[in-house]
Amino acid sequence: MKNLIFIVSFLTLFSSLADVRVLKHQKAADIFTNWHFFENGRGMTISPNMSRLMWMLGEDRRADIKHIKDPKEKADIITNFIAKKYGFVVQDEKLMGVFNVKYKNMDIGVLGCTACHSGKAAGIFVPGLGNKTIDPYTVGRDTLRIQRFWGFGNRNPDFKYIHEKALYFAKVTSDRNIASLTRGLVPDSTIKTFFYKDHGLPYPKDMGRGQVKAPHLWGIKEKRPAGVFNDGSLSGDSYAWIFGAELFASDSGEHLRAVLTQIKWLTDKVLANLLPPQYPFKIDKDRVLRGQEVYKNTCIKCHGGHERDPQGHPIYTTPKVIPKHIVKTDEEKLNIIDDEFIRLVETGSLRDLLTFEEENIRKGYFAPKLWGVWSRFPYMHNGSIPSLYDILLPPEKRPIIFSMLEAGEEYRFDKERVGLTLFDQREYKRKLRSAIKGDRDIYYIKREGQSNQGHYFVKTFGKLTHEDRLDLIEYLKTL
C-alpha cells in the first residue's frame, strides 16, 4: 500500500512539474488580456464618457436596440455590432482589449494591447496572436466624427486634456495618406508621427504607411536580441520600442517613462511565458514524418530548427534577419525607417531610451520561428499570402484577392491549405471589382505595400510536388 501511495504521489508530482509551463502560460494569458497602460490620464483612449454610448459608433447602426429591456441582451447586441464593424475580437461576451476605466469621475474608454495582439484562428481565441480583423482606420474615422462635437463647451481641464489627445489619436489614425488600406493591417507610420510632434513639426503626408499585420508575441523575449518586430531595425535592447503604438496614442514621452518598469515586466515576465496554440484538428502522422524531411531540405536554412523541452514545449531561439535581395518581399515597410526618422529619434526627447540596430536598417525581414505558424495566417509581414500552401507556389499563382471578414472564425479556415478560404468562382469577378474600388474588407495585392511577391525559392520550392507541399504543411501543423 505504501508503495502504491509513493507511486501515485510521484506521478502527481511529475504531472504538476510537466504542466508548469502550461500553468505559467495560462496566468500570462490572463494578465495580458486584461492589461492596459492607461496612467494619470494618459494612454490609448477615446474621449471621456464616450464609452457610455459606444453603440453610436458608425454611420450604419444595424441593430435597433430601443425595444430591448434586458440590459445584458442589449449589451450583447452592442458588443457584437462593434466587434463586426471594427474587427475587435469577442471572448466571454467581452470586446478584447477594450476597457472602461473610472478616472476623476469620468468613464474613459481605453484600448489595451490585446485589441491588436490577441486574435482568433479557426474559431479559437489565442492570446498573443495578431488580430486578423482589426481596422484602425475605421475606428479612427468613426470616433473622430463623434469626438469633434463631443463635450462641446466642457471646460473641465481633466476632460479637455484627455479629449484633445483622443481627438488627435483619431485624426492621425484616420488620415488616408498614412493609414493602412485593408483591415487586419496596422500602419507603422502612426508611430512615426510622434517623433515629428516631439520636435514641434507637422508630419509629412507622403511618409508612407508601413503596413504590417500585428505580430504574434510568443517567443518575444528570445526574439529581442535580433531586434523588434518584422525587420530588426529597432533595437531589442530598447524596451521602449515595444510601446510604440501607445506612445503615439498618448502623445507623451512622460507616459512612456512612467510605465517603462511595467513594460519590462510585461515583456520578460508575462509575454515570455506565452505558448503557441496547438493545431486543433486531426494530423496525419505519416505525412508529418515525410514533411519533416521536406522541411530540412527547404526551410531550415532560414527558419532554423525547432527544439522542445522534455515536456514537449518550444525552446524559443533568436531568428535571423534575411536580406531583402534574398527574400524579395514587399519593401514598403523597410522604407519607413528612413534617415529623417532616425535623426528625429536620435535628437528627440526619448533619445536615451530608443536606439537602432544599425546593421539591420533597411536590410530585410526576420525569418521568424514557426511555432504556432498554423494560426498566423495570412502570411508574410504584410499578410499578403492567405495560406501556407500558397506560400509554396510561384507568386504568379498566388491569390490576388481574399476576404478578411471574420478571418479568425472556423468557417474561414482551410484545413488542407492551412489559412484562409478563398472566394468561389461565382463571386470572384464581383469581389475583384469591389477590391479595385478600395473595399477594406478584401485584401488586394495591387495596393501600396501589399504585394505578395517574394519568398519563393526556385531551387527548393520549385522541386516540390503537390504531395510534398501537403506533407510539409502537415509537419508545420505540429509546431
Image: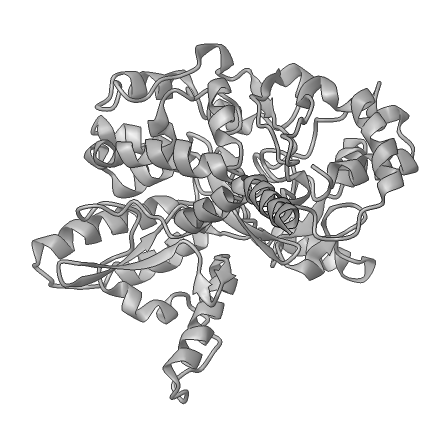
Q: Where is residue 414 drawn, in percent x and y?
A: 76, 52
Residue 83, compared with residue 189, is above or below; it is below
Judged from this view, the residue extending furthest toward the top is 359
Is 417 placed left or right of 139 in the picture? right
Question: Which quadrant of the figure has residue 477?
Answer: top right
Q: Where is residue 9 drawn, in percent x and y?
A: 58, 47
Is 355 placed left or right of 79 in the picture? left
The answer to whether residue 47 shows anywhere in this view is yes
Question: Coloured how?
Answer: one colour
Question: Which quadrant of the figure has residue 430?
Answer: bottom right
Residue in the foreground of this view, choosing between 9 and 96: 9
Residue in the foreground of this view, choosing between 126 and 64: 126
Q: Where is residue 256 drawn, in percent x and y?
A: 25, 34
- Placement of the C terminus among the 4 image quadrants: top right
Question: Which quadrant of the figure has residue 412?
Answer: bottom right
Give the residue displayed 49% in from the left and 10% down from the top. Answer: 359
Is 159 placed left or right of 321 in the picture? left
Give the residue displayed 57% in from the left and 27% down from the top. Answer: 316
Residue in the foreground of this view, choosing between 28 and 413: 28
Residue 301, compared with residue 149, is above or below; it is above
